[in-house]
Image (cartoon, rainbow, N blue to C red):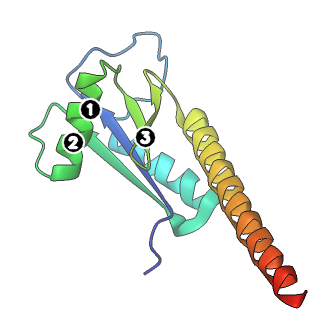
Amino acid sequence: MIKPVIQITILDDSKGEKCDAHCGADWSSAEVIALATQRIRGRFGDKIKLQYLDLSKPVTNHHALKLSQGSKKENLSLPLLVINGQPRISGQFDIRLLLDAIDAEIEINYEQRERLSRSKYQGESKRGFASLT
């Protein structure tokens, strides 16, 4: 099995207040999560894992508890989009914004890998030239 490159977590409270004007997706809906998963797979393949955590239910695992406590400590609005452990969107968002945030995360990760690769190559080439003289 391919290890997910990006872990997406949506924290929400299914019993909390909802926007009457349909400000964003109703992430507590299984249909919305299924559609988001389908769109993510269609656009990015299987390298991304989507998880929904309903804070109105007892939190059972350590990772979920840590995210829940962090969101409360930072006073972040729900729903909360967390990508690789970092809060990215606090408050109402839809699937389009979710996909845009994933695109941005991929671009950031790519640029960081490129920078690391260039610095490693430059270090090797400097050592290589030094050893030739």
Please tell me whether mark 3 sits on a helix, a strand or a loop: strand
- Residue at image position (84%, 80%) is 130
Residue 34 falls left or right of residue 46? left
Assign the N terminus to one quadrant of the image.
bottom left
- Label disc, if present, on residue 86 of the rendered structure: 3
Q: Position of residue 7 (x, y in %)?
A: 43, 55
At horizontal 16% and vertical 51% (from top left) the residue drawn is 62
Q: Which residue is mark 2?
A: 66
| Callouts 2 and 1 close, C-beta under 8 Å | yes
**Which class describes the residues within 10 Å of circle 3: few (<14), some (14-19), or many (20+)?**
few
Q: Point out the image quarter for the C terminus.
A: bottom right
* Mark toward the start of the polypeptide (3 vs 2): 2
Disc 3 residue type?
Gln
Residue 70 is marked as: 1
Question: Which quarter of the figure has residue 44?
Answer: bottom right
- Label 2, residues with CA under 10 Å away: few <14, some 14-19, many ≥20: few
| Mark pair 2, 1: CA separation | 6 Å
**Image point (24%, 28%), residue name:** 13
Residue at the farthest top position: 20
Instruction: Judge the density around disc 1: few (<14), some (14-19), many (≥20) Cα neighbours within 10 Å.
Output: few
